[in-house]
């Protein structure tokens, strides 16, 4: 956090200059804004008449218009707002002229403000409200220590309570006091609970050990799933186990939220040992405990992911080997069948004498087909049996025994598995095997009857045993061991077996808010803003029932009357099938508008964007005030280009005028996920302030989309996965991005095997820009059994695109009545909603949704567990049932409205256009990522997004200036509003980089003049 001097005191620098202006600066209106905000309702006109002079009335309209936008009051002379003033005089006072443009009297100004507050039911932030703000800030600080989080919580509270926003200096002081209060509370907690042995253990983490600090060694994560890497990971876990147990006891007692634990742990990841030693001693211990807590759980995530990966790998290998063996058997059988035909012909061969000895005939038969193969073929013909592929699979598992024991058994032994069921036959087998392996006693030394076997499925038992020499059943222990691993993997993925020391694989109940928090349900619901929970569930369901049933009736009537012209109905006998035309609405990428522009170096583009939104200010030195290195913007831009283009710092050092050592020092000190996200937010927010931005709205709302883009990894990392569709035999990752009005407002790196639908809410809810979508679309991959419900609870309208809408609706449209009660309607439900189940489980549903809002864990983890089919408890089924209501309402809207379908397609096309730009930006090394760790992949992802964001800002800035020019000369500029800012043919992304030379400055006015002279927009004469 930054500290700035102010009147002898230190204040937090929470926002950048542009962000402060965005909140606290008087609004600057376009002509359209003036028409909207300076229009007066009848109550407002009545208040206007209470003032006598034109000057007072004009000032009242100005204050009123500005308040509508920002819910604040501003002090200004009339000459400062000349364009707004002239509009008001023309609109309301017959184009009168005002001679006196000075500030109106204080009493008049305050009276106007009081009337406006009363009109909108707002109140000033007086002493009582400020005390409540202080409490709110202190509460927010327990959830997250980030100043911006506390600031936003206060802003939300002010908006909710309809309180006029106080000055920025007060907000700085309030947030600063909240952080200090929280730190003092935590310091006191650490002092009271940490004992000297604990302190000594924490200090050892920062001691130099054989050239590397212990904490530095702990930060390293496995590169892949190899046995050597996982062995090192387990050693790290053993090293910090006692400290983890301390953290598990102390952190809950200290009241540190999961969000804060993650944040403090990330600081240890970023900070050097030197920086950690500069912290307050007790705060340093807290950060280290949070890191240990995170790292130990991360270790278990890595181990269990490795276990699941290897079980699947061995199983797939056995399946493939079995398929090949079956094929070989059938091939051999076909060859033997031809020989069997030759054998049969011997019995009709007249050249063989009737008295030929049988022995001679046998010899001739066996010369054609040997005895063993003949017997096998004869048995198969008699019994008509097929080759058992499962038998071949288990035979191959026998051959894999040494390998799977080496890779799976160590993880199996170190991880503590738990199940909620008291009697669980698989857990009995797991405990038995762990005891045996701990004693170094092979399973083969136990009598077969001693090994738990109730968990073995009936269909598998015949493969688990063989007959011994005394004709007794004997358990095949290698197969038994692998079966336990295979079933354990299935149960881990289903959530029926879990690990408490993990994040991804812990119990679902552990992901939810605890009982103590749940006792404050009403307050927490209000804090998170879950307004749906404010009304009784019976009333809420009644409203949904009325809405859904009326829509079913309306839509069928519109189809029958022909009003819905776009649905195509085909009758086949007594059955009817309908279809919707595929909607194509492409927004061209690399629009011809940009072809005539002079090519511009990417470095110059970044320099231009920084001049307008100061995104480079977001890059704070990792040592903060203790830093000796000053930030060089040119070197920083070089680092961002090296990361974002996938070129790498080494290659950038070779082809630019900045050396590798300088690049790495700057990258290590300034480029972190935290600073990159702040920089991206600044650029995104700056684009949102440009005049062209709101013209990208779809149906007058911000309609976003999210989708994953696959990238092959040249160097394998632990999150790289196979995907034959995208990578062939190689591995890769996916970059999942939220695009709103062409802008990539949020993104994250996920595994190529992860289901995208699990990240939809996560990426929306954790979007920290000012661009907040109203409607959100995905393709079919973004849908699951809970996303409609979850997004609905949090105020988003979920609008996915379906590949086959007829089959989807035919199997998934639900109603509040039995299907037979809908008669012969074309579009009718297939099942009745179980409202009793929803009402019975409503409180549990509230707890789940509230946990998502309070970020008790990563939202994608909760959503993944909720949408998994393998485990369906009562609460999950109730949430799915509620989801079906919201989903059914969307189906009906999707069928009925061509504009809805077009809007969805348009939003998704924007995401695809962004992916093309992203691919062009990151095409160094042929687009194959060369980063060695998951952390580096995430840094690349954010740097790449930052470069694309800057290109989009540059393009949108040109379009905005063209648009403003067109409005000034009153020319039709509708075509400009439809030009996508996603274009790069005029950007030089690669080549020889010279950052130490004076960067070519970009003169937008000069570019506009060139464009005007070239008449770049067909049909629009801007001359």
Image (spheres, rainbow, N blue to C red):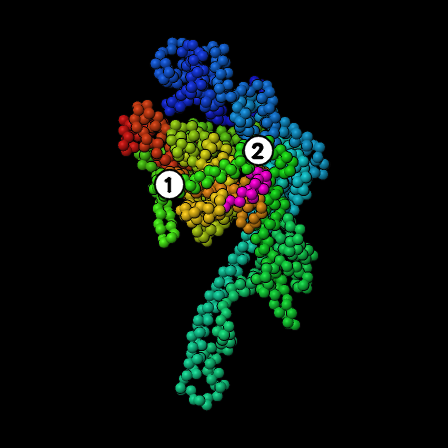
Residue 478 appears left or right of 1020 = right
Segment tinted magenta in the rendering: 832-849
Which residue is at 66% across, 51% downward? 422
Which residue is at 65% across, 42% downward? 244
Question: How far is mark 2 from mark 1, CA to CA?
Answer: 40 Å
Magenta stretch holds residue 846: yes
Residue occupying the far bottom of the picture? 355
Which residue is at 52% across, 59% downward? 317
Q: Label 1, secondary structure: give it.
A: helix
Q: Quadrant of the N terminus?
A: top right
Q: Is residue 775 above or below residue 92?
A: below
Judging depth in this view, the residue of 44 and 157 nearest the camera is 44
Q: Quadrant of the C terminus?
A: top left
Residue 32 horizontal/vertical position (percent): 37, 24
Visible residue check, residue 601: no
Q: Which residue is mark 1?
A: 558
């Amino acid at each position: 956090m930054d500290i700035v001097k102010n009147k002898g005191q230190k204040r937090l620098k929470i926002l950048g200059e542009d962000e402060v202006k965005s909140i606290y600066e008087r609004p600057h209106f376009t002509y359209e804004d003036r028409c909207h905000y300076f229009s007066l309702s009848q109550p407002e006109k009545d208040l206007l008449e209470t003032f006598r002079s034109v000057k007072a009335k004009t000032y009242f309209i100005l204050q009123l218009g500005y308040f509508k936008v920002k819910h604040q009051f501003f002090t200004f002379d009339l000459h400062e707002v000349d364009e707004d003033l002239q509009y008001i005089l023309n609109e309301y006072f017959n184009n009168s002229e005002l001679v006196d443009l000075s500030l109106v009297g204080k009493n008049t100004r305050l009276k106007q403000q009081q009337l406006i507050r009363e009109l909108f039911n707002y109140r000033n932030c007086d002493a009582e409200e400020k005390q409540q703000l202080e409490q709110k800030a202190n509460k927010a600080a327990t959830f997250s220590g980030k100043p911006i989080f506390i600031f936003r919580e206060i802003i939300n509270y002010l908006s909710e309570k309809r309180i006029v926003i106080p000055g920025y200096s007060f907000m700085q002081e309030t947030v600063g006091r909240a952080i200090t209060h929280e730190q003092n509370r935590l310091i006191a907690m650490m002092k009271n609970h940490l004992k000297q042995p604990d302190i000594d253990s924490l200090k050892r983490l920062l001691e130099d050990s054989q050239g590397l600090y212990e904490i530095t060694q702990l930060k390293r994560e496995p590169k892949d799933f190899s046995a050597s890497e996982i062995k090192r990971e387990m050693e790290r876990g053993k090293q910090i186990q006692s400290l983890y147990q301390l953290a598990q006891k102390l952190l809950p007692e200290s009241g540190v939220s999961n969000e804060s634990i993650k944040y403090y742990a990330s600081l240890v990841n970023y900070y050097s040992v030197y920086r950690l030693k500069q912290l307050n001693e007790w705060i340093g211990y807290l950060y280290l405990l949070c890191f240990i807590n995170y790292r130990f759980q991360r270790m278990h995530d890595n181990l269990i992911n490795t276990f699941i990966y290897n079980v699947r790998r061995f199983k797939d290998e056995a399946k493939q080997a079995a398929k090949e063996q079956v094929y070989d058997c059938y091939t051999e059988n076909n060859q033997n069948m031809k020989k069997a035909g030759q054998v049969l012909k011997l019995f009709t061969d007249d050249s063989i004498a009737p008295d030929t000895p049988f022995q001679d005939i046998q010899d001739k038969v066996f010369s054609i087909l040997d005895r063993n193969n003949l017997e096998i073929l004869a048995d198969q013909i008699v019994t008509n049996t097929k080759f058992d592929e499962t038998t071949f699979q288990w035979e191959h598992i026998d051959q894999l025994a040494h390998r799977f024991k080496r890779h799976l058994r160590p993880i199996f032994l170190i991880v503590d598995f738990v199940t909620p069921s008291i009697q669980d036959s698989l857990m009995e087998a797991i405990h038995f095997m762990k005891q045996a392996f701990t004693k170094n006693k092979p399973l083969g030394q136990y009598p077969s009857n001693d090994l738990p076997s109730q968990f073995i499925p009936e269909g598998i038992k015949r493969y688990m045993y063989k007959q011994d020499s005394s004709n007794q059943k004997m358990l095949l222990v290698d197969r038994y061991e692998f079966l336990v691993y295979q079933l354990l993997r299935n149960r881990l993925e289903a959530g029926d077996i879990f690990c408490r020391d993990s994040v991804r694989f812990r119990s679902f109940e552990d992901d939810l808010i605890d009982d103590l928090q749940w006792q404050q349900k009403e307050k927490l619901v209000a804090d998170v803003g879950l307004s749906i929970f404010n009304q009784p569930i019976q009333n809420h369901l009644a409203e949904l029932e009325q809405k859904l049933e009326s829509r079913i009736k309306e839509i069928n009537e519109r189809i029958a009357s022909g009003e819905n012209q776009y649905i195509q109905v085909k009758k086949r006998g007594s059955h009817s099938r309908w279809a919707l035309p595929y909607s194509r609405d492409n927004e061209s990428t690399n629009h011809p508008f940009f072809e005539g522009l002079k090519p511009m170096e990417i470095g110059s583009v970044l320099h231009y964007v920084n001049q307008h939104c100061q995104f480079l200010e977001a890059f704070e030195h990792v040592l903060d005030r203790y830093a000796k290195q000053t930030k060089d913007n040119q070197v920083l831009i070089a680092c961002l280009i090296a990361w974002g283009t996938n070129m790498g710092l080494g290659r950038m050092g070779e082809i630019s005028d900045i050396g590798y050592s300088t690049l790495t020092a700057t990258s290590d000190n300034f480029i972190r996920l935290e600073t990159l996200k702040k920089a991206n937010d600044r650029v995104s927010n700056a684009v949102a302030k440009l005049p062209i931005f709101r013209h990208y709205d779809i149906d007058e709302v911000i309609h976003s989309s999210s989708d994953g883009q696959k990238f092959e990894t040249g160097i394998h990392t632990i999150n790289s996965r196979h995907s034959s569709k995208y990578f062939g035999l190689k591995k890769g990752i996916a970059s999942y991005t939220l695009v709103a009005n062409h802008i990539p407002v949020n993104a994250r790196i996920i595994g190529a095997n992860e289901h995208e639908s699990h990240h939809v809410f996560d990426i929306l809810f954790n979007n920290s820009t000012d661009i907040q979508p109203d409607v959100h679309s995905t393709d079919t991959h973004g849908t699951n059994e809970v996303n409609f419900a979850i997004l609905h609870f949090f105020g988003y309208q979920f609008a996915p695109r379906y590949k086959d809408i007829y089959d989807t609706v035919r199997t998934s449209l639900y109603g509040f009545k039995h299907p037979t009660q809908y008669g012969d309607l074309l579009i009718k439900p297939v099942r009745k909603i179980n409202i009793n189940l929803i009402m019975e489980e409503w409180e549990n549903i509230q707890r789940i949704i509230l946990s998502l809002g309070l970020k008790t864990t990563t939202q994608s983890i909760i959503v993944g567990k909720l949408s998994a089919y393998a485990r369906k408890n009562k609460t999950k089924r109730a949430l799915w049932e509620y989801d079906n209501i919201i989903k059914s309402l969307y189906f009906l809207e999707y069928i009925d409205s061509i504009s809805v379908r077009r809007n969805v397609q348009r939003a998704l096309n924007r995401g695809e256009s962004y992916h093309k730009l992203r691919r062009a930006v990151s095409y160094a090394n042929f687009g194959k990522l060369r980063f060695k760790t998951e952390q580096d992949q995430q840094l690349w992802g954010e740097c790449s997004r930052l470069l694309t964001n800057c290109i989009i800002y540059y393009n949108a800035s040109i379009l905005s200036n063209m648009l403003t020019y067109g409005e000034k000369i009153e020319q039709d500029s509708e075509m400009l509003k439809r030009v996508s800012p996603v274009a790069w043919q005029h950007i030089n992304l690669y080549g020889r980089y010279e950052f130490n030379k004076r960067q070519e400055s970009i003169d937008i006015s000069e570019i506009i003049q060139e464009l005007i002279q070239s008449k770049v927009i067909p049909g629009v004469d801007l001359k």
